[in-house]
Image: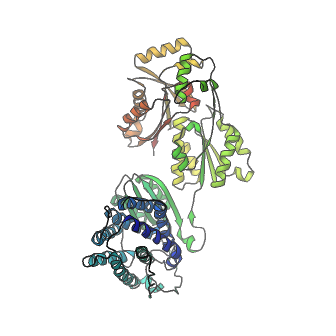
Amino acid sequence: MEYLTQNELKRMFLKSWERIEKEKEEINKINVFPVPDQDTGTNLAKTLEGIKKEIEGKEFKDLEEISKSALEGALISAQGNAGVIYTGFLAGFLPKLNKNPVDAKKLAEAFEEGRKRAWKSMVNPKEGTILDVIDVVAETFKKEAEREKDIVKIFEKVIEKAKEALLATREKMEIFKKANVVDAGGLGFLMILESYLDALKPEEKREREKEKPSEEIRRFVQVLTNRFEVVALILDPRFDEEKVKGKLKKLGNCLDIVKVGNKMKIHIHTDYPEEVRDEIKKIGKIENLRIEDMAKEIAGEPSLRKVSIGIVTEDVASILPKILERYQIEIAKTKFNWPELEKIEGENIYQKIKKAYEIGIETRPRTSQATPKEYFEAIKKQLQNFEKVLCLTVSSGLSGCYNSATQAREMFSEKDRERIFIFDTQNAAAGQALFVLRAIELIQEQREIEEVIEELKKLIQKTHLYIIFADPKGIEFIGRITKSQANWIRRMKKLKIHPIMTIKNGVLTKGGTVFAKDEPETLFKKILKESKKERKLGKKIRVIINHADNLDGAKRLKEFLKGIGAEISFISEGPPIICAVTGPGTLILGWQPIE
C-alpha cells in the first residue's frame, strides 16, 4: 500500500476508537503518573469518541475535509493529559494531510509535525512519557520512508520501535519502577498505532505483541498534590498558548494547552480550581468546563463536580433557535392575538401590521403573559433533564409572567419546588436575552445555582435597554398618545431629534432624545454616551439587537457598534408583544458590560 486516502484515514480513526474503548481499563489500571487518577484510558476513549461522532456515517471528498472534521471532534472532546497531548499531536499531524493521495514521505512529515505540536502542548514535558513514544514513531517513520514505499510495512517497523520506547519508560521514572508499569499514555498511543495498522490491512489478523505491560500491577497510591483536574474549552481566546501558560502555570501542574483556529483546550491539575476557573474566564468565552476531584476518584467516590441547571424563559427574550437548541432552553409562550391580521397579506407579522395601519382597521391587538400552565410544562421538561431549573422572566413591572412562573412553581411537589428558582430580570426583549446568555456562561463555568443568581442580581442595574420606533403610528393606533402628540413627534424626527424609550427599575419609561440622522445612528449615539464609563475602564460591552422588519437598520447599527469593539451576540426579530405596540421599523438595543 503506497498511498493513504480519506477512506483509510476514516477507518484508522474508527478502529482506534473501538480499540481504546474496548481496552481503556487496561490503560487505566497502570495510570500512576502524573497522578494515580486511573483515567488515562477513559480520557483517550472520550477524545476518540469525539472524532468518531464527527466522521461516522459521513462521506468526505478528500483528506483535508476529513482531517478538519476529525480535529474539530478531538478538540471539543479531549480530556486529561493524554487526550489533550494526543489532540496536540493531531493538530500538527492532520493539517499536513492536505492533498490526496498521501505517500509515505508525506506521512512522515505529518508525524514529525505531530511530534512538535505534542511537545508544544505541554508546559513541563518529561522523558519517560507518551512523548517518548511519539518521538520514536516520528523518527522511525522518517527513516523508513526514505527506503520503503509500502505504508503498511513502515507501520509494522514503527510499531516495533514504539513498543521498545514504551517498555523503556518503565526505567525512566522512579514511580514506574516501583509500580512495575509503563506510561499509560504511551500504552494508549501504541494501541492507537496498532489500530491504525489494523485498519490498513483489515484482511489480516496482526499477531499481538508478546511483551505486554505487567498484568499483575499492585495499586500504587501517590500522595496527591494539585488534587483537582480542570479541563476547559475556550472560544475566541484573547491570548496565544505561551501567554496562557504564563497565566496558569503558577496555579498547578500537568498543564496542557492546544489551540486550533478560534478554539483552545486547556488541561491543568490544581489545588485552586476556582482561581483557575476565574483566570480561564479572562482568556476567552468558556464553551465548557469540567472540574474533577482526583482524590475522590481514587477512593471510588463521585469525583466530578457537575452543575446541572436547565433554563426556562419566555419568547419575549427573542433568543435565536440555535441557542435554544444548543443549551436546551425551554420557552413559555406569551399570547399575541389580532385575528384581523390573518386576512392581510405580508411576508411577516410586521408587514401585516403596517398594512393594517394603512387601511385603518379598528380592532386592536391583545396581548397577555404566558400562563402558569405554560411555565409548568416548560419547567417539568427541564426537571427531567437537569437537577435544578432557573426561570428567567420578563420584568414583573411590565408583565404578569413572573407571577405566572411563581404560580407554576407551587404546582410541583415540595421536593421539586426546592429545585426550581424564579428570577425577575427586570428587563425585556434584548435586555432579558442578555441575562439568559450570562446565565449560560455561569453554568458553563460550573457555578452553583445560588452563585448564578447572585451574579445575575449584580447585573440588573448594569443592563440597559433602548427602544426606538420609526414612526409613532403604532402607539397612536393603540391609544397610548393622541394624534396631535404623534404629529409633534413626527415633526421632531424630521428635525433629526429622536425620542427613545428605556427600561428603568423594571418599568418602561422615557429615555430622552438624541440628535441623529436616523434610528440606527440614534441608538449608537445613545450607547456611545451611556457606556463611556465602562469602556474607559477597559471593559467590553455585550449587545443584542432586535428589530421589527428592519434588518437593514439592525445591520447598520451592528456596524457602528463594531467600530467601538462591542461584542454583538446576535440580531433577532423583536417580540410582537412589544414591537406590535411600537410598530414596524422598531429597533431595540440591549447591552451589558462584560465583567
Q: In which quarter of the image is the N terminus?
A: bottom left
Residue 275 in the image: state x and y as whole percent: 47, 58
Q: In this view, does 104 lie to the left or right of 316?
A: left
Residue at the image point whose x is 40% and y is 16% from the top: 495
Give the camera-side residue of 518 and 206: 206
Residue 474 visible in the picture: no
Q: In which quarter of the image is residue 476?
A: top right
Instruction: Count up the numbered dots.
Output: 0
Residue 21 vs 391, above or below: the answer is: below
Give the camera-side residue of 564 and 370: 370
Residue 321 in the image: state x and y as whole percent: 53, 43
Residue 125 vs 518, above or below: the answer is: below
Residue at the image point whose x is 52% and y is 22% from the top: 354
Q: Which residue lies furthest to the left in this view?
A: 146
Residue at the image point whose x is 62% and y is 21% from the top: 364
Q: Is residue 493 left or right of residue 563?
A: right
Q: Which colour scheme is used?
A: rainbow
Give the camera-side residue of 380 and 127: 380
Residue 497 visible in the picture: yes
Residue 499 in the image: state x and y as whole percent: 47, 22
Q: Quadrant of residue 396?
A: top right
Give the camera-side residue of 409 and 144: 144
Q: Residue furthest front?
A: 203
Residue 16 in the image: state x and y as whole percent: 46, 71
Residue at the image point whose x is 39% and y is 39% from the top: 535
Residue 155 vs 505, above or below: the answer is: below
